[in-house]
Image (spheres, rainbow, N blue to C red):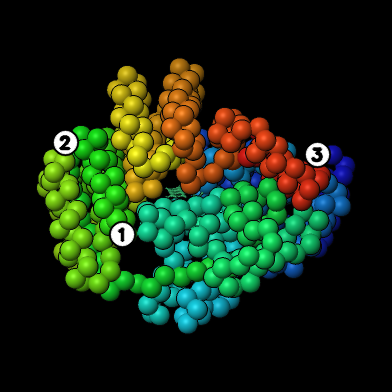
Amino acid sequence: MTNDRQLAIAALAARFGDRLSTASAIRDQHGHGESWHPTALPDAVFFAENEAEVSEAVRICADHRLPIVPFGAGTSVEGQVQAMQGGLSIDLSAMKRIIAVRPDDMDCTVEPGVTRVELNEHIRDQGLFFPVDPAGEATFGGMAATRASGTNAVRYGTMKDMVLSLRAVLPDGTILRSGQRAKKSSAGYDLTRLFIGSEGTLGIITELNLKLAGIPEQVSAATCSFPDMESAVRTVVEVLQCGINMSRIEVADEVQLKAINLYCKTNFPEQPMLFLEFAGNAKGVAAEIEIVRDLAQGNGGSDFRWAANEEERRALWHARYMAVASSKLLKPGARGMSTDVCVPISRLVECIAETKADLARCSLPAPLVGHVGDGNFHLYILFDPDDPTETAEAMRISEDLAARAIAMEGTCTGEHGVGLGKRKFMVEELGDPAVAAMRAIKAAIDPHNLMNPGKMLP
Ligand SMILES: Cc1cc2nc3c(=O)[nH]c(=O)nc-3n(C[C@H](O)[C@H](O)[C@H](O)COP(=O)(O)OP(=O)(O)OC[C@H]3O[C@@H](n4cnc5c(N)ncnc54)[C@H](O)[C@@H]3O)c2cc1C
């Protein structure tokens, strides 16, 4: 560690005492997320308790040019929290205040360490919920910073749609407010959305104003099996083209179903399946169910299984949420490389068909699961990182898939973000002028490249 870094760490330790840790286990825990990328350790970890402390710590880092990596829950999957140049990991998970809930405005104000599970527990009695649902432990700071989404995005949108405004500590310690609580605003550049998806490269989000949704009167969930993936995905496209406002519509392939059955001790048919959820008033839900059933049957769908009550509905979605955990059983000890493409819905059948044809020639298990209502799907490619042949094959499948999606006017990342893993596709997807504009924004806000250096921009 350089002398200047030692001085910075000493200054932080003097100010924050034992909330500044250089213990190797703590540094290791903060040097990797849930991704397959190698660990990169920070020099120290600071557990912040409020915005003023974040600002103070950032000022100390800025004075000594010490890199900073914001850290929420570490569930990101593209190498976002690795400290590529060491420095200080600022852990926001203790900033857990739910500052205000305003049922009349259907919004709330939270600190960045609150998780959606915690918020939903807190507001359920008021008939409200927050719909964006990545990994259960993910924090709102991390969710905003990765522009996360999940199973409900087909109806409610992603974090870009659900954040009204935010507060952030800039790389020199200044505190910025991106807007107020109005549902819309034309006041200048959209700084809220600049920070959403910025992956900790522009500043540290310290407070968020979030939109909330009303818990629907009736929610019904079902699964439906199909002879092949094309039939399942064609059903999704037809459902959306009919204008049916599904609350969730997810696909899993036969490999994923096998893993889920193993892990959850369920007995789903091991063939392509849609997970469906309808929400609204009783009459509307009943009518939509009929239309979707007809469309599914027209595409060879069968074995509709309805969740008879709330407990069964939760069990059904629990099985879907366990997709990643269950996949690990298919190749014990393997690492998982997650892909995350998203294409216009009209190209989805083609994109999945080409991907499945590629997988048929591949020796690695790679279950497919997706938020297909948005045109977004993931492979979880299981490989041995110590085996160069397997690593090369996993990389090839992942890169070919990203290139395929971009060629179809889609994206290499629908929701996980760029981190380390998708940097190489930024120019191919966006073009040189857009990437140059991003670099200019980064240089203007963070001239010394202190905030999460080495991420996002190629
Ligand atoms: C099993 C599993 C399922 C998942 N499913 C989904 C899914 O369906 N949809 C989806 O979108 N994602 C999914 N993810 C990915 C992950 O949950 C999301 O990326 C999530 O938004 C990360 O939140 P976090 O709090 O863990 O952030 P972290 O991993 O801690 O950080 C992520 C990035 O945000 C930055 N950051 C964190 N906090 C702040 C802050 N306060 N201010 C500024 N920057 C900050 C970090 O520097 C880093 O760049 C899944 C992950 C797992 C393991």
Residue at 50% from the left image edge and 45% from the top image edge: 416
Q: Quadrant of the C terminus?
A: top right
Seen in the picture, residue 22 relative to 16 is either above or below; the reply is above
What residue type is disc 1 on?
Asn
Q: Give the number of the mark in front: 1 or 2.
A: 1
Taking the image as drawn, is residue 244 in sight?
yes
The front one of 356 and 191 is 191
The residue carrying mark 3 is: 1
- In the drawing, does residue 146 fall left or right of residue 335? right
- Numbered marks: total: 3
Q: Quadrant of residue 353?
A: top left
Circle nearer the N terminus (1, 2): 2
Q: Give the number of the mark in front: 3 or 2.
A: 2
What residue type is disc 3 on?
Met
- Crowd rating for badge 1 (residues with CA inside 10 Å; few <14, some 14–19, many 20+): some
Circle nearer the N terminus (3, 2): 3
Q: Position of residue 357 (x, y in %)?
A: 30, 24
- In the drawing, does residue 110 fall left or right of residue 267? right
Q: Position of residue 83 (x, y in %)?
A: 67, 42
- In the drawing, does residue 286 fall left or right of residue 64? left
